[in-house]
């Protein structure tokens, strides 16, 4: 998404955007880290115990605040939602509903569901971010498929391993643009159909590992897209500039992408419940840490590049 390019004169060209991303990105990152630590600790407690309940409420509270801060950034006119409203109205409508829900409903409903607990609480937790998840899958799905370009994909995939960093970067950009519609459509199908079924099964107390795997297929497709579109981008930036923040994002992104892409397999393997739960906590947490950290870093980069708001003067 070009919306987080800190020096793009055609999009973010104001200091307010950078300050908001720096501050809210930092808050969201701290909440994501705290939530992940608590979630991992929660797997060591017995389900239904007081410790488990307290940790769950604390985790859901941090999740809700993290998503609140994150979506207050997304819904800005000079950010993702504003871009979608102007360029792809279908995604804009879905995004508006998602941002409204994450900023007005979930900050209260998610911790409340954790307090209620039981099957109802788990079912709501499963569906609580459905609107937001659909938005991130509808966005790439709205892009037009260029079949002539798709035919050349093998050649571009080979260029990802070229010695020339410029060739690798061009290949990464090409693959992101031309593979994203396919990943988006798969994600819409898996998340749109199977995640509600998964939530219903939790409500009824009749979970099915194959339904869970199909629902997590939406995470597999989305994180394949993220690996190409974001993680590789940061990796190639790090190799070119030696920037420590790009190395950090590339590392966190690669770990989060890999763990989320493996989720459908984890669902069906004969592993213990605690092992599966711990894997999912880490997969979800790393993804949230990546995107929140990325916002904080992009905001900082903008402010460091233009400390006196000289960006607007240069582009005027």
Image (cartoon, rainbow, N blue to C red):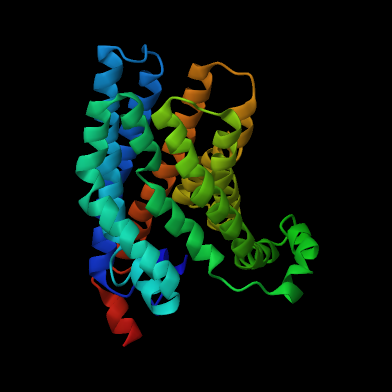
Tally of numbered tags: 0
Location of residue 81 by image quarter = bottom left
Q: Nearer the viewer, residue 137 or 279?
A: 137
| Residue depicted at 43% across the width and 37% down the height | 199
Q: Quadrant of the C terminus?
A: bottom left
| Residue depicted at 43% across the width and 67% down the height | 91
* Above or below 127: residue 135: below
Q: Position of residue 244 (x, y in %)?
A: 46, 47
| Residue depicted at 58% across the width and 29% down the height | 209
Q: Position of residue 86 (x, y in %)?
A: 38, 78
Q: Nearer the viewer, residue 147 or 124?
A: 124
Location of residue 99 by image quarter = bottom left
* Above or below 245: residue 306: below
Q: Nearer the viewer, residue 163 or 252?
A: 252
Q: Nearer the viewer, residue 87 or 7?
A: 87
Q: Position of residue 226 (x, y in %)?
A: 55, 52
| Residue depicted at 28% across the width and 83% down the height | 313
Q: Is residue 75 left or right of residue 203?
A: left
Residue that lies at the very extreme toward the bottom in this rendered image = 316
């Amino acid at each position: 998404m070009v919306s987080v390019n800190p020096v793009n004169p055609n999009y973010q060209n104001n200091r307010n955007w950078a300050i908001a991303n720096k501050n809210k990105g930092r808050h969201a990152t701290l909440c994501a880290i705290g939530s992940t630590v608590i979630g991992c600790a929660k797997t060591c407690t017995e389900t239904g115990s007081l410790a488990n309940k307290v940790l769950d409420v604390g985790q859901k509270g941090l999740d809700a605040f993290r998503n609140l801060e994150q979506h207050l950034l997304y819904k800005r006119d000079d950010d993702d939602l504003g871009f979608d409203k102007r360029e792809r109205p279908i995604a804009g409508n879905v995004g508006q509903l998602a941002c409204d829900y994450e900023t007005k409903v979930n900050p209260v409903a998610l911790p409340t569901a954790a307090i209620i607990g039981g099957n109802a609480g788990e079912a709501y937790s499963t569906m609580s971010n459905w609107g937001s998840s659909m938005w991130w899958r509808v966005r790439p799905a709205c892009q037009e498929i260029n079949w002539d370009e798709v035919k050349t994909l093998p050649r571009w995939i080979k260029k990802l391993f070229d010695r020339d960093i410029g060739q690798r970067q061009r290949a990464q950009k090409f693959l992101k643009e031309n593979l994203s519609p396919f990943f988006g459509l798969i994600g819409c199908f898996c998340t749109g159909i199977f995640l509600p079924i998964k939530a219903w099964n939790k409500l009824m107390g009749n979970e099915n590992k194959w339904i869970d795997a199909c629902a997590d297929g939406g995470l597999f497709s989305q994180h394949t897209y993220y690996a190409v579109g974001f993680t590789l981008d940061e990796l190639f930036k790090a190799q070119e500039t030696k920037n420590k923040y790009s190395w950090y994002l590339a590392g966190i992104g690669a770990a989060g992408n890999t763990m989320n892409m493996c989720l459908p397999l984890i669902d069906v393997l004969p592993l213990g419940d605690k092992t599966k739960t711990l894997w999912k906590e880490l997969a979800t947490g790393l993804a949230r840490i990546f995107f929140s950290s990325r916002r904080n870093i992009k905001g900082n980069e903008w402010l460091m590049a233009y400390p006196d708001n000289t960006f607007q003067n240069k582009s005027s």
